[in-house]
């Protein structure tokens, strides 16, 4: 429940930051991306469908961009994005001029496997699918492996597959 509360708090923060009406009352066009169909990032398209942004003078166009949200921000294709922390932090550390408005300090991902995997040790010699290197999916997989006494790249080969649907299809 804390996870949902934090997600809603982040959404409300973004909502308030972008709740600006222009002086002539027209909707301000804004493009916003989300990189996963998970609970935290689904808030963006749900907010759009609920009309929350229009009430604040924004005409938000949501764009699904798996694993490339930072590139979309840098290129000016979107004005804001809901994404995992690692890509944004890595971009800032590399000198990219972007602002992180909010975040959380817990991982909301789960490790999903085929039915033949009964124990984390069964992952030795297997491949783990992520969206792209440098994303939250890679970081989360590395953390999960380490917590279970495994080492990425030695015990499990990490491969880039794509978005959540592609990774589930890869099972």
Image (spheres, grey):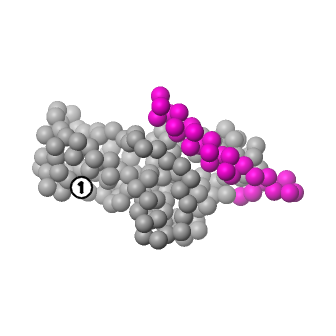
Which quadrant of the view contains residue 168?
top left
Outermost residue on the right side: it is 24
Residue 149 vertical position relative to residue 78 in the rendered view, above or below? above
124 in magenta: no
- Note whether residue 57 is visible: yes
Please state the horizontal and vertical placement of residue 55, each as a whole percent of the image: 76, 43
Q: Position of residue 45 (x, y in %)?
A: 59, 45
In the image, residue 30 above or below residue 12: below
Work out which quarter of the rendered image holds the C terminus and state it. top left
Query: Which segment did they paint magenta?
Result: 1-29
Return the residue nearer the eye: 104 or 155.
Answer: 104
Badge 1 element: strand
Residue at image position (52%, 37%) is: 6
User: Left of 82 or right of it: where is 12?
Assistant: right
User: Seen from this angle, which residue lies furthest top?
Assistant: 1
Q: Is residue 170 visible?
A: no
Q: Position of residue 59 (x, y in %)?
A: 71, 52
On screen, residue 41 above or below 157: above
Asked if residue 24 is among those painted magenta in the image, a careful observer would answer yes
Which residue in the protein does label 1 denote? Answer: 158
Residue 52 versus residue 102: which sits nearer the camera? 102
Q: Look at 21% across and 34% down and name the residue there.
A: 115
At 25% across and 39% down in the image, what residue appears? 113
| Circle 1 Cα neighbour tier, 10 Å, few/some/many (<14 / 14–19 / ≥20) | some
Instruction: Judge whether 43 appears above or below 139 on screen.
Output: above
Identity of the residue drawn at 70% across and 41% down: 51
Give the mark count. 1
């Amino acid at each position: 429940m804390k996870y949902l509360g934090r997600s809603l708090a982040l959404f409300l923060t973004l909502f308030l930051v972008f709740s600006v009406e222009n002086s002539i009352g027209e909707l301000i066009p804004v493009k916003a991306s989300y990189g996963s169909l998970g609970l935290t990032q689904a808030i963006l398209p749900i907010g759009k469908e609920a009309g929350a942004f229009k009430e604040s003078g924004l005409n938000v166009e949501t764009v699904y961009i798996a694993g490339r949200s930072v590139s979309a921000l840098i290129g000016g294709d979107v004005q804001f994005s809901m994404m995992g922390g690692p890509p944004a932090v890595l971009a800032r550390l590399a000198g990219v001029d972007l602002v992180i408005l909010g975040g959380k300090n817990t991982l909301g991902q789960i490790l999903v496997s085929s039915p033949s995997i009964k124990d984390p040790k069964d992952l030795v010699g297997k491949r783990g699918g992520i969206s792209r290197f440098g994303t939250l999916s890679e970081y989360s997989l590395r953390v999960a492996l380490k917590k279970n006494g495994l080492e990425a790249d030695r015990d499990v080969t990490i491969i880039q597959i794509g978005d959540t649907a592609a990774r589930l299809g890869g099972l």
